[in-house]
Amino acid sequence: MTVKFSGENGKYFYSLVQKKLIDWCIFDLSCTNLGRFDFYYFQKSNPIDQDDFPESFLENSCEKVNSKSKRKKTSWKRTPRGLIMRIGNRSNSNYSRLYQKTKKINHGVYDEMNRGFKFELELKNQLVKSFQKFLFNNHLEEFEGRLVEHFYKHYKKCFVLDTCYTDWLKTLREESWIAINRSKRGPTNHKAFLTKEGKKIIQDRKKDFEFFFLIKEPSAYVFTSEVNHYQKLRREAITKDVNKIMRAVSNQLSGQPNVTSHSFRIGYITQLWKDSKDIEFVKQTIGHQRLDTTSAYVNKLSDQERRERISELNQMCSEKGLGFTLRPIITKS
């Protein structure tokens, strides 16, 4: 007996599996196999992406695949519905297709029409059987995690990555930085680099991050407002909640210092300057536009710290043959 689910019916059936409403015992699992499983991701295109010609992206991706494998037949063409690219034969265990399409996203109150690319992967034969045991045992987290990992690895081999169409494949774990929009008081798209500890956290939660961003709708927000779940959570709301916790902690400390979320930024900037002795480096790292903005964050140095800094500057002057000496001004307590 063969049971087939296609399109929306397949999605509905899997939603029942996720809710644990499917009793796999009705099947004889000793001779039951998944024949095919489709997996896809929709990448929304921004208006600015239209300047990045999709035809060139598809052509370069075809060349990448064909140069690495003579067995995979890879081609692309323009159809009345848009561009389409096929990788491999329909009978292959991994059969990939890329569609240029418009997707309607229902937000409850309104519908949004998004244009972009749909990355689709068909898993068949022995390959899909290697995943099915996790599905039949209702180990959905393991099932989905392995599928996501396979999906990522497969498409990284098929497409050129330095484009707006595949930036979702270049994960935070690989790049080790995140973009911060500080257009109000600093340069836009400022990069914040991860520390060694931050990289370890990302590495340990690799599957969680990749699966989360893959299933999330491109236009959806991770953190939303309590009033409107389709509206992003404002920065002020996060700061307010964090400061509530910081005030509670401060009240338990000796002297009850006024510690807020901003105290961490002040401390970080001060320590970064003490360690680097380079105010311009600190300014660029933080993302400030003006040097005096960065200087205002730096806490006053002690007499000992000023002596050490002056000594270092004098040594530099001596090495460069400059004929003057700097002396620190000692402040009275």
Image (cartoon, rainbow, N blue to C red):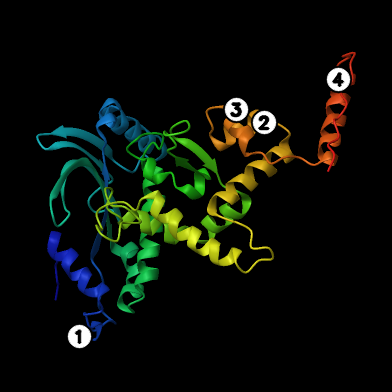
Residue pictured at 19% horizontal, 43% vertical: 114
Q: Mark 1 vs mark 3: give the one in front.
A: 3
Q: Quadrant of residue 5?
A: bottom left
Residue pictured at 26% horizontal, 59% vertical: 227
Work out which residue is located at the far front of the displayed protein and give it. 333
Near mark 1 (Cα within 10 A), the count class, few <14, some 14-19 or many ≥20, is few
Q: Quadrant of residue 271?
A: top right
Seen in the image, is 98 located left or right of residue 311? left
Residue pictured at 31% horizontal, 64% vertical: 128
Q: Which residue is mark 4?
A: 317
> Decide: marks 2, 3 in contact (CB < 8 A)?
yes
Q: Which residue is mark 3?
A: 291
Residue 110's label in the rendered image is none
Residue 247 visible somewhere in the drawing: yes
Quarter of the picture holding the C terminus: top right
> Decide: marks 2, 1 in contact (CB < 8 A)?
no
Q: Amino acid at mark 3?
A: Leu
Who is closer to the viewer here, 234 or 221? 234
Distance CA(mark 2)–CA(mark 1): 69 Å
Residue 6 visible somewhere in the drawing: no
Near mark 2 (Cα within 10 A), the count class, few <14, some 14-19 or many ≥20, is some
Q: Mark 1 vs mark 4: give the one in front.
A: 4
Q: Amino acid at mark 4?
A: Cys
Residue 46's place in the image compared with 169, above or below, is above
Who is closer to the viewer here, 325 or 148? 325
Q: Mark 3 vs mark 4: give the one in front.
A: 3
Q: Position of residue 221 (x, y in %)?
A: 31, 52
Q: Which residue is mark 2?
A: 279
Residue pictured at 72% horizontal, 40% vertical: 300
Quarter of the picture holding the N terminus: bottom left
